[in-house]
Image: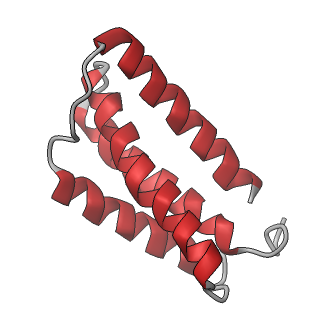
């Protein structure tokens, strides 16, 4: 859960930096690509942490932080001048990190 919180705070920092620099609210450019990569990251994270049980309350949190906020952060990363592949990495890594919201305790192997 601490991993997901750290990733979420980093995403908010990137989004707020982009909005302060750009001053224009825009929608993410290719939402289908970012959405697919975020879902792939969430699935990989879920498998990586041992396929914990998915409950309604935690699944909403995973989708909000791992899909909506991550897609916005990926788009902001590219618009701030990072290479194009960085957005894909943000989608995959932050999507995987958001899957740790599903855990009831710390990671089993840490």
Q: Is residue 19 above or below residue 53?
A: above
Q: Is residue 106 above or below residue 53?
A: above
The residue lying at 41 percent from left, 56 percent from top is 92
**x and y percentages locating residue 15 in the rendered image:** 43, 29
**x and y percentages locating residue 21 in the rendered image:** 36, 10
Q: Is residue 26 above or below residue 43?
A: above
Is residue 2 something that shows in the picture? yes
Q: Is residue 60 left or right of residue 88?
A: right
The quadrant of the picture occupied by the N terminus is bottom right
For residue 37, which quarter of the picture? bottom left
Q: Out of 38 and 28, give the one closest to the viewer.
A: 28
Is residue 48 something that shows in the picture? no
The residue lying at 51 percent from left, 37 percent from top is 11
For residue 77, which quarter of the picture? top left
Farthest-out residue, top = 21
User: How many numbered discs?
Assistant: 0
Q: Is residue 55 left or right of residue 15?
A: right
**x and y percentages locating residue 17 in the rendered image:** 45, 18
């Amino acid at each position: 859960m601490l991993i997901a919180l750290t990733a979420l705070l980093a995403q908010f920092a990137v989004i707020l930096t982009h909005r302060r620099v750009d001053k224009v609210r825009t929608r993410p450019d290719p939402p289908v690509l970012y959405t697919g990569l975020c879902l792939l990251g969430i699935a990989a994270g879920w498998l990586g942490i041992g396929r914990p049980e998915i409950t309604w309350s935690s699944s909403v949190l995973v989708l909000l932080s791992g899909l909506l906020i991550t897609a916005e952060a990926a788009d902001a990363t590219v618009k701030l001048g990072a290479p194009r592949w960085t957005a894909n990495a943000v989608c995959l890594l932050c999507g995987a990190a958001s899957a740790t919201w599903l855990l009831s305790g710390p990671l089993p192997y840490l």
